[in-house]
Image (cartoon, rainbow, N blue to C red):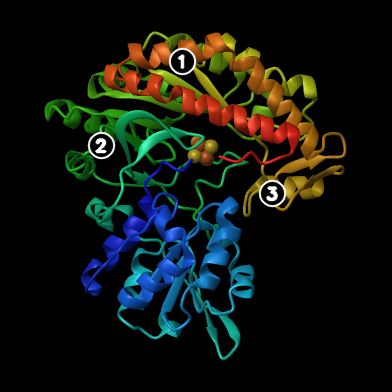
Amino acid sequence: MGFFPPIGLEYIATALKDHVGNLTLIDLRQEREYNNPDRLRKFIKENIDLVCVSVNWSYFFNDVCNLINQLPNDIKLVVGGQQATDNVEELFQRCPDLDIIVRGEGEEIIQDIAQDIDLKDIDGVSYRNNGRIIHNPNRQLPKVDSLRNPDRSLRRTSYHIKSKGVRLFKTVFDTVLSARGCPFKCKFCTMDLNPLGQKRNYSARSPESVVEEIKGIDANIIFFADDNFFVNPQRTEKIFDLLIEQGINKRYIIQVRLEIYKYPHLLRKAEKAGFKVMLIGIESPHDWILEQLDKGFNSEEVRKAFKVLKDYPFFYHCYFIYGNIGESREEMLYIPRFSQEIGADSISFQKLQARKFSPVKEIVKKTPGYHFDSNNFVYSDRYSIKDLRQIQKIIKKSFYTPSKLCSMLKKLYDIKFIMPADLLWFFIRFPALLYKVLAREIEKRTGKKKNG
Ligand code: SF4
């Protein structure tokens, strides 16, 4: 989405701090001036002797390969991140001067590399040796509490909520990671696995350390990057209590499971502590799909939960998956109606993906008539990717009506997620957003790129 700080790379940079003289962190999504290859090359040649590149999203993969191939080839280069881990062989093949790939979580590995430990002795790396690619064994996962908080002073730019590249609100945005892993086993999800496919046991930081980190953050809106913030209700309550006791005045976004409705006293504390937006994975309105995905609840429980949740002043964003195995067009198109019925404030919907290591991949392989494309999106003989895209458009149009967009904005304002200054900013920037949306639509329809 382009507005999340590069928190993963910041963890790596922080881990490196004691081992190098100077550190520079460049976010190429934001610092456009460095997208000029000559400038970037010159900067690296004059200042840098170890370059670490992170690639986490498939849609950046080609760009990052091109970038790597333009970097000076006499400077040590290490590449890591989810996409590097998933595509080690391809990355080496496409980047002939790349020598080291870090697989999985890299905080400890990068310290070993910076200390010039022999590559053959560093678990978790793949490297080139006399033209051969060597894959060392996987590395044991570190405990999340053993990691130092990311050093935000390395940031050279601030982050704001954006849409289509347009900054929507004035308030600065940041992310905090309070725990890694998730004890649930939803079949489509690889969040509970690390990029090597290793099950990441739920590992949480102490409430005190989380609140200490928050106190040092300038941003007023904080997104908890935890897969599931509510795994341990006692720990969550302690975080709420500490935030309330210490009078920390920020607004928070969390990802939670539906079962949060069973804890009304925690919902009240969450409200008091400044929690505003909850992102909840519902996945499907249909019981047989929820069962297929091993979600652990059914549609009746979803309705019951939302009856409780709507009494609390939170903004509920629900995630859905469509194009499930055996799902008909009509069933997919029920998503917006169901969302309205339960009272979801906003929704997002994704085609089913057969990600590496996800059980869905094996199921798709065994199901006649079902396939996945190079981005792992599942399609079938009945519904092609193009058909699914059309269905997606219909879902989007029927949910996001102009009145829905207005009620979303109103709710965000009513619950004080957006403040008067944000609202003013939004209305000033709205024409730019509208222009971008329309320009993109025209471009799609005419197939021509508009200048300016
Ligand atoms: S979908 Fe959510 S609850 Fe299920 S395994 Fe993934 S992170 Fe956990």
In front: 343, or 434?
434
Q: How many marks?
A: 3
Q: Which residue is mark 2?
A: 219
Q: Residue furthest left?
A: 246
Of labels 1 and 2, earlier in sequence is: 2
Answer with left or right where residue 238 lies relative to residue 369. Answer: left
Up the image or down, 180 lies above or below 117; here it is above
Cα gap from disc 1 to disc 2, whole angstroms: 23 Å
Asked whether residue 323 appears in the rendered view, the answer is no
- Residue shown at 80% from the left, 46% from the top: 371
Callout in the foreground (1, 3): 1
Quarter of the figure that contains the C terminus = top right
Residue 145 location in percent, x, y? 28, 53
- Labelled pair 1, 2 in contact (Cβ < 8 Å): no
| CA neighbours of label 3 inside 10 A, class few (<14), some (14 to 19), many (20+) | some
Residue 310 location in percent, x, y? 43, 10
Q: Which amino acid does the dot numbered 2 rest on?
A: Ala
Residue 138 location in percent, x, y? 49, 69
* Callout 2: SS: loop
| CA neighbours of label 1 inside 10 A, class few (<14), some (14 to 19), many (20+) | some
Of labels 1 and 3, earlier in sequence is: 3
Q: Which residue is mark 3?
A: 376
- Residue shown at 64% from the left, 38% from the top: 450
Q: Which amino acid does the dot numbered 1 rest on?
A: Met
Up the image or down, 299 lies above or below 167; here it is above
Q: Which amino acid does the dot numbered 3 rest on?
A: Asn
Cα gap from disc 2 to disc 3, whole angstroms: 35 Å
Callout in the foreground (2, 3): 2
| CA neighbours of label 2 inside 10 A, class few (<14), some (14 to 19), many (20+) | some
Answer with left or right where residue 81 lies relative to residue 218. Answer: right
